[in-house]
């Protein structure tokens, strides 16, 4: 079995994927030939985050189509299939691909948050957390663990936990009809939304600040576009959560007549985020790179 809506949705996902690839190419071209570590931190944050999202979206385009292929057509209405059982090889492959894709989304969540902090406060939280050489327990001479190592371990454990809690689920909504969903879970939802909500709060604060400050128009416009890029992406996350609540109790006939429109709209919101980021970085002039120093 295959969910027909997912076949149609490939169009929206491919368009979104192409937009993010174009943005990634544009960002990378801006400092082509410059070693990654020598590029401005804001540029590195967005390049890494968008790269993570490209990985996620590429695999996402495949996962939801192949997951139900091996589910028997005789499966009864209301049945659910999930996990890594070799009895359903397509679902097994889909869940493995999902495990590879999730870190890409988490990387985007972290670096978007990090970019928002730097734009607002001029603080590189990657350096402060992951690369700090300060001792975790400065008064304990026999414990030589650095803060950077400690936070890296926390990050690894967090990513593994999210991967374990996440799963692809195939719901049989009628005889011969299925719906593929991610069993994201409350913990994962709070974890991911926490990063983006915080980043969105900072970017709204930044946009309000930019309305009252005097600076070169080009800097102001670029910072505003970066802000709207993060804000629209977070709006997309909340939108997907709302869509999930709305459609979880609908019948198969209701589902097929309504959901496709909402699914396309959700990917449209995420695509709009890519457009804002593109507008922020499209100039070939390195001197107009968005600056963290513009924040209060």
Image (cartoon, helix red, strand yellow):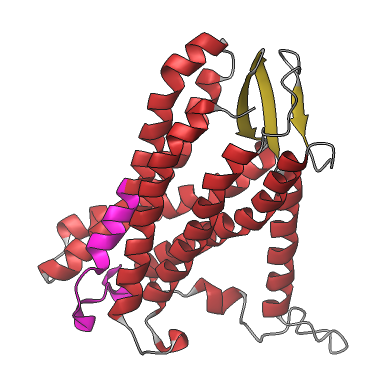
Task: Compare residues 88 and 219 and report the one nearer the observer.
Answer: 88
Residue 29 falls left or right of residue 201? left
**Residue 239 in sight in this render:** no
Q: Position of residue 94 (x, y in %)?
A: 68, 45
Q: Quadrant of residue 84?
A: top right
Horizontal relation, residue 179 to residue 235: left or right: right
Q: Is residue 279 magenta?
A: yes
Residue 44: x and y in percent read 43, 75
Image vertical order of residue 170 relative to residue 174, above or below: below
Q: Is residue 282 magenta?
A: yes
Q: Is residue 182 above or below residue 252?
A: below
Task: Give the quarter of the figure containing the C terminus.
Answer: bottom left
The foreground one among 73 and 236 is 73
- Residue 143 is left or right of residue 250, and the answer is right
Quadrant containing the N terminus in the rendered view: top right
The extreme right residue here reads 142
State the residue in front, 270 or 159: 270
Residue drawn at 47 percent across, 47 percent down: 197
Q: Which residue is depicted at the point 72% across and 65% down?
A: 156
The residue segment tinted magenta is 272-296
Q: Main secondary structure of the magenta part?
A: helix
- Using the rendered image of the protein, determine whether residue 34 is visible from the camera's viewpoint: yes
Q: Identify the residue shown where x is 32% and y is 83%.
A: 31
- Residue 155: give x, y in percent of width and height: 68, 65
Q: Indicate the quadrant where residue 82 lies.
A: top right
Residue beneath the point at 62% across and 48% down:
191
* In-front residue for pair 233/57: 57
Q: Is residue 212 left or right of residue 268?
A: left
Quadrant of residue 292 in the image? Answer: bottom left
Q: How many marks?
A: 0
- Residue 210 against residue 121 in the figure, above or below: above
């Amino acid at each position: 079995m295959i969910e027909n809506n997912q076949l149609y949705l490939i169009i929206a996902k491919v368009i979104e994927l192409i937009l993010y690839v174009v943005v990634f190419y544009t960002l990378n071209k801006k400092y082509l030939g410059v070693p990654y570590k020598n590029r401005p931190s804001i540029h590195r944050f967005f390049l890494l985050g968008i790269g993570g999202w490209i990985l996620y979206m590429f695999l996402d385009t495949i996962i939801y189509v192949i997951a139900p292929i091996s589910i028997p057509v005789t499966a009864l209405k209301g049945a659910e299939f999930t996990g890594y059982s070799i009895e359903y090889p397509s679902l097994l492959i889909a869940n493995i691909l999902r495990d590879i894709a999730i870190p890409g989304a988490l990387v985007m969540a972290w670096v978007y948050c990090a970019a928002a902090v730097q734009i607002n406060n001029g603080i590189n939280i990657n350096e402060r957390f992951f690369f700090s050489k300060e001792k975790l327990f400065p008064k304990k001479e026999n414990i030589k663990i650095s803060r950077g190592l400690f936070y890296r371990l926390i990050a690894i454990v967090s990513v593994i936990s999210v991967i374990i809690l996440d799963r692809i689920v195939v719901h049989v909504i009628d005889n011969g009809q299925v719906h593929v969903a991610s069993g994201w879970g409350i913990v994962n939802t709070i974890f991911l939304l926490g990063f983006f909500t915080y980043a969105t709060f900072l970017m709204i604060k930044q946009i309000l600040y930019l309305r009252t400050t005097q600076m070169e128009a080009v800097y102001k416009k670029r910072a505003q576009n970066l802000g709207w890029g993060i804000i629209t992406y977070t709006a997309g996350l909340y939108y997907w959560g709302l869509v999930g609540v709305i459609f979880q109790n609908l019948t198969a006939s209701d589902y097929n007549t309504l959901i496709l429109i909402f699914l396309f709209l959700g990917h449209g919101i995420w695509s709009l985020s890519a457009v804002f980021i593109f507008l922020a970085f499209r100039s070939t002039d390195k001197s107009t790179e968005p600056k963290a120093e513009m924040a209060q």
